[in-house]
């Protein structure tokens, strides 16, 4: 009898706990919480349109600064190696913002936000689109708001570069179809160095004449053939995306053909045994002898081969290694883009579905450790690099660096949950379920909307989680996912809406106007109000600015603009990227 009593007590406590877990952890006034989140987005947008406007050129342009000091309202400024200081306005770093402004107008009915986005875009087309069609923007070039001239760090020679940006082409085409088509064709023309081999590079030249862009022969090459350009998937993603959007807009069969060919190059370089990879489909041709082992320029040959080759042999290449950035680029950033475009392309998108499903299933099988929610750093042939101590300096870290296993974050949660929804591959759902548990969200269910046990007490405040949960809700119409998305979003606003902007914490100095947090909150609101089409699908794109920067003490280092968004009161010297140049 005593044992039966204990069992009954345990069951009773479990039922009460579960009831509280599902009920009392919810906001007491859901409508008020929903409104508070939207109010935060509106305040953010109003603040940046006021604090971030051009007051530097004297011409009252519609252009915006990239980042704002939330305490002083000063803009992010870049100091070149020669000491010249400029005000940073890089339109490539404002494409999520365009989506936020347009979506905010769609949801509120207040057209001022969309109007601001339209004015910025029109100004860029009118004043900063070169004769060939390219915009003055990207990783190594931007507009100085003081002089309204295109500038950039001198060591990059003002090349054109986009990496995982995913410009808001749908809005572009709505505003100016002709300029949009010209840009996409110029983009391909500038970044394809050799059409017959489909040699691409992340660096493109301005001022080229486009001509008959797609009229070229093509001969398939062997995986990892040598080229002068680096075929980073980051750069390939933007070319693929632009080509497929051009086909979608104009039914240009050439754009579809070449975008499909380019996407296939990375698939053809996957390891035939594991199906893993590939971040590059070429390797850089060696044209000079390196002055030291640590030199990271690609003219000295494949940087992974130089750093790992003595221990791992000739198959250790930039195209075969899978560290954190490679995993996120291939299995989240590329995956989300190709899934979305496959949806839009219908029958023409079938290969993109298959390629994405097969690749993500391979990562789940070979790299992921479910019980720990960790990913093994590895080569695409399956060789595990966990706890490897680097024996020499190089592109992937200093000598003595230990390659640790990688936490599987919410960035992968959204790609795996979305991929499952369109492919119904159970291994993808199992991985999404495990990642969700590993990030404090509880159990998404043995399958969508079945055996759910979500964690309504979660501390998770990640925008990626909001996107993922809304995705699952949209497909299942199960309100539990939507309720958890609300809680994560409430945590996000509580922890990351600071001083009228979205920052990682209250002591962070600069806010990035291209932050994805307001985008996630708008996506949630659109789901709540039953109007998901009012907010474009999240693709996990973002821009960056990189190059030489002169610090106040006179030192010059290669940094990315993310440096500014890590600055905190009392910590004015975060780590920089100077030792991992992406030249």
Image (cartoon, rainbow, N blue to C red):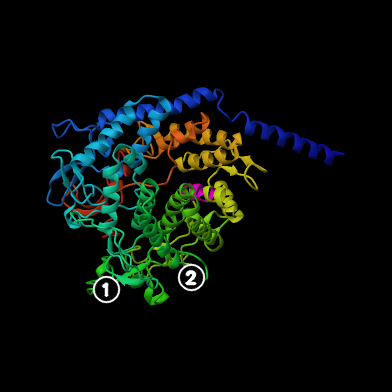
Magenta-drawn segment: 410-417
Is residue 274 among what the camera can see? Answer: yes
Q: Is residue 576 visible?
A: no
In this rendering, the count of numbered labels is 2
Q: Is residue 443 left or right of residue 151?
A: right
Give above or below for 339 relative to 40. Answer: below
41 with respect to 509 (left or right): right
Q: Residue at x 45, y 60 (%)?
A: 404
Left or right, 232 with respect to 367, comes to left
Q: Is residue 285 above or below residue 79?
A: below
- Residue placed under numbered mark 2 in the picture: 381
Against 468, is 236 above or below? below
Kindly identify which residue carries mark 1.
286
Front residue of this view, candidates 407 and 351:
351
Q: Position of residue 347 (x, y in %)?
A: 50, 53
**Mark 2 neighbour class, 10 Å CA radius: few under 14, some 14 to 19, many 20 or more:** some
Q: Residue at x 28, y 47 (%)?
A: 561
From the top left corner, tell me how far across and down residue 570 is, in percent. 30, 40
Q: Magenta stretch containing residue 217, yes or no?
A: no
Out of 384 and 95, give the one closest to the viewer.
95
Above-or-below relation of 100 to 293: above
The residue at 12%/48% (across/down) is 83
Q: Residues within 10 Å of mark 1 (few under 14, many from 20)?
A: some
- Separation of disc 2 and disc 1 at Cα? 24 Å
Q: Secondary structure at mark 2?
A: loop
Residue at x 48%, y 64% (from the top left corner): 276
């Amino acid at each position: 009898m005593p044992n039966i009593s204990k069992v009954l007590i345990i069951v009773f406590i479990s039922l009460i706990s579960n009831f509280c877990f599902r009920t009392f952890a919810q906001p007491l006034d859901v409508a008020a919480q929903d409104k508070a989140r939207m109010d935060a987005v509106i305040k953010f947008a109003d603040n940046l349109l006021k604090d971030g406007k051009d007051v530097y050129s004297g011409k009252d342009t519609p252009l915006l600064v990239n980042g704002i000091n939330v305490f002083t309202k000063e803009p992010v400024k870049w100091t070149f190696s020669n000491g010249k200081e400029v005000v940073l306005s890089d339109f490539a770093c404002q494409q999520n913002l365009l989506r936020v402004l347009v979506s905010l107008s769609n949801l509120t009915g207040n057209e001022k936000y969309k109007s601001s986005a339209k004015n910025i875009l029109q100004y860029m087309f009118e004043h900063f689109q070169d004769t060939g069609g390219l915009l003055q923007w990207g990783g190594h070039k931007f507009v100085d708001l003081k002089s309204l001239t295109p500038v950039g760090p001198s060591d990059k020679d003002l090349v054109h570069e986009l990496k995982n940006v995913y410009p808001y082409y749908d809005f572009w085409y709505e505003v100016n179809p002709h300029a949009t088509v010209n840009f996409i064709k110029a983009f391909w023309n500038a970044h394809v160095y050799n059409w017959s081999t489909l040699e691409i590079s992340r660096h493109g030249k301005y001022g080229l004449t486009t001509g008959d862009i797609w009229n070229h022969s093509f001969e398939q090459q062997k995986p990892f053939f040598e080229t002068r350009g680096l075929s980073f998937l980051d750069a390939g993603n933007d070319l693929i995306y632009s080509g497929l959007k051009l086909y979608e807009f104009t039914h240009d069969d050439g754009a579809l053909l070449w975008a499909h060919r380019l996407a296939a190059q990375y698939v053809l370089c996957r390891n035939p045994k594991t199906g893993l990879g590939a971040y590059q489909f070429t390797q850089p041709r060696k044209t000079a002898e390196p002055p030291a082992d640590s030199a990271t320029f690609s003219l000295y040959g494949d940087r992974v081969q130089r750093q790992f080759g003595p221990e791992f042999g000739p198959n250790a290449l930039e195209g075969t290694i899978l560290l954190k950035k490679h995993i996120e680029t291939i299995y989240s950033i590329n995956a989300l883009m190709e899934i979305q475009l496959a949806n839009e392309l219908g029958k023409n998108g079938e290969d993109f579905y298959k390629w994405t499903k097969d690749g993500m299933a391979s990562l789940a099988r070979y790299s992921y450790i479910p019980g720990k929610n960790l990913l093994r750093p590895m080569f695409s042939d399956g060789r595990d690099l966990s706890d490897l101590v680097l024996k020499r300096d190089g592109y992937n870290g200093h000598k003595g660096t230990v390659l640790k296993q990688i936490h599987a974050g919410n960035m992968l949660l959204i790609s795996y949950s979305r991929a499952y929804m369109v492919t119904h591959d159970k291994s993808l759902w199992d991985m999404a379920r495990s990642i969700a548990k590993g990030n404090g969200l509880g159990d998404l269910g043995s399958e969508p909307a079945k055996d759910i046990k979500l964690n309504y007490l979660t501390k998770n405040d990640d925008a990626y989680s909001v996107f993922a949960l809304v995705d699952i809700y949209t497909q299942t119409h199960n309100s539990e996912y939507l309720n958890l998305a609300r809680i994560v979003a409430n945590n996000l606003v509580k922890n990351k809406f600071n001083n009228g902007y979205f920052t990682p914490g209250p002591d962070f100095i600069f806010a990035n106007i291209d932050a994805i947090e307001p985008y996630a909150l708008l996506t949630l609101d659109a789901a709540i109000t039953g109007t998901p089409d009012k907010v474009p699908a999240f693709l996990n794109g973002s821009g960056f600015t990189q190059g030489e920067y002169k610090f106040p003490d006179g030192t010059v280092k290669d940094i990315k603009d993310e440096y500014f968004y890590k600055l905190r009161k009392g910590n004015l010297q975060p780590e920089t990227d100077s030792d991992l140049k992406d030249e």
